[in-house]
């Protein structure tokens, strides 16, 4: 999938949430963001949460996200929430044990 493509719906488990937020200036406005690692057992990606989505997401919970945007940073695919993103809790998704294992910070 090319960068900038909209992902209409994905169900994932949140493997980890960054302990801190960052503030980034986007089109002249400060926006608060937080990254998290997600998996659907076929792939593991970074998801960038923005503004209202930051407090909705918790470690090891499963969610359905709609209207995400795909981005490429440093050659790696990332997903990011958008103004149109909806986030709802879903039944616990089973992901491989390797995905849930704690990671060393990069």
Image (cartoon, grey):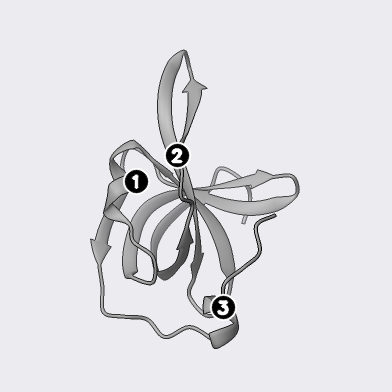
Quadrant assignment for the C terminus? bottom right
Residue at (48, 17) in percent of width and height: 27
- Mark toward the viewer: 1 or 2: 2
The image shows residue 55 at horizontal and vertical percentages of 29, 48
Q: SS at mark 3?
A: loop
Q: Which of 81 and 58 is in front in this view?
A: 58
Q: How far apart are marks 3 and 2 (CA)?
A: 23 Å
Residue at (37, 81) in percent of width and height: 93
| Label 3 sits on residue | 101
Callout 1–callout 2 Cβ contact below 8 Å: yes
- Mark toward the viewer: 3 or 1: 3
Q: Which of 19 and 41 is in front in this view?
A: 19
Residue at (49, 51) in percent of width and height: 18
Dot 3: few (<14), some (14–19), or many (≥20) neighbours within 10 Å?
Answer: few
Sequence-earlier tag: 3 or 2: 2
Sequence-earlier tag: 1 or 2: 2
Question: Eyeballing the image, is 93 above or below 14?
Answer: below
Name the outermost residue toward the right.
75
Sequence-earlier tag: 3 or 1: 1
Callout 3–callout 2 Cβ contact below 8 Å: no
Dot 2: few (<14), some (14–19), or many (≥20) neighbours within 10 Å?
Answer: some
Locate residue 90 relative to residue 93 in the image: left or right: left
Q: Distance between the residues labelled 1 and 2?
A: 8 Å
Q: Nearer the viewer, residue 7 or 26?
A: 26
Q: SS at mark 2?
A: loop
| Label 2 sits on residue | 21
Dot 1: few (<14), some (14–19), or many (≥20) neighbours within 10 Å?
Answer: some
| Label 1 sits on residue | 54
Q: Distance between the residues labelled 3 and 1?
A: 22 Å
Residue at (39, 65) in percent of width and height: 59
Q: How many labels does the image show?
A: 3
């Amino acid at each position: 999938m090319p960068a900038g493509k909209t992902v209409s719906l994905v169900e994932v488990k949140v493997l980890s949430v960054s302990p801190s937020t960052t503030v980034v200036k986007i089109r002249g406005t400060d926006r608060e963001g937080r990254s998290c690692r997600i998996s659907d057992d076929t792939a593991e990606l970074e998801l960038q949460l923005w503004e209202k989505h930051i407090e909705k997401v918790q470690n090891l919970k499963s969610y359905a996200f709609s209207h995400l945007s795909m981005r490429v940073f440093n050659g790696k695919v990332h997903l990011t929430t958008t103004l149109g993103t909806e986030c709802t809790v879903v039944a616990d998704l089973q992901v491989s044990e390797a995905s849930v294992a704690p990671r060393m910070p990069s």
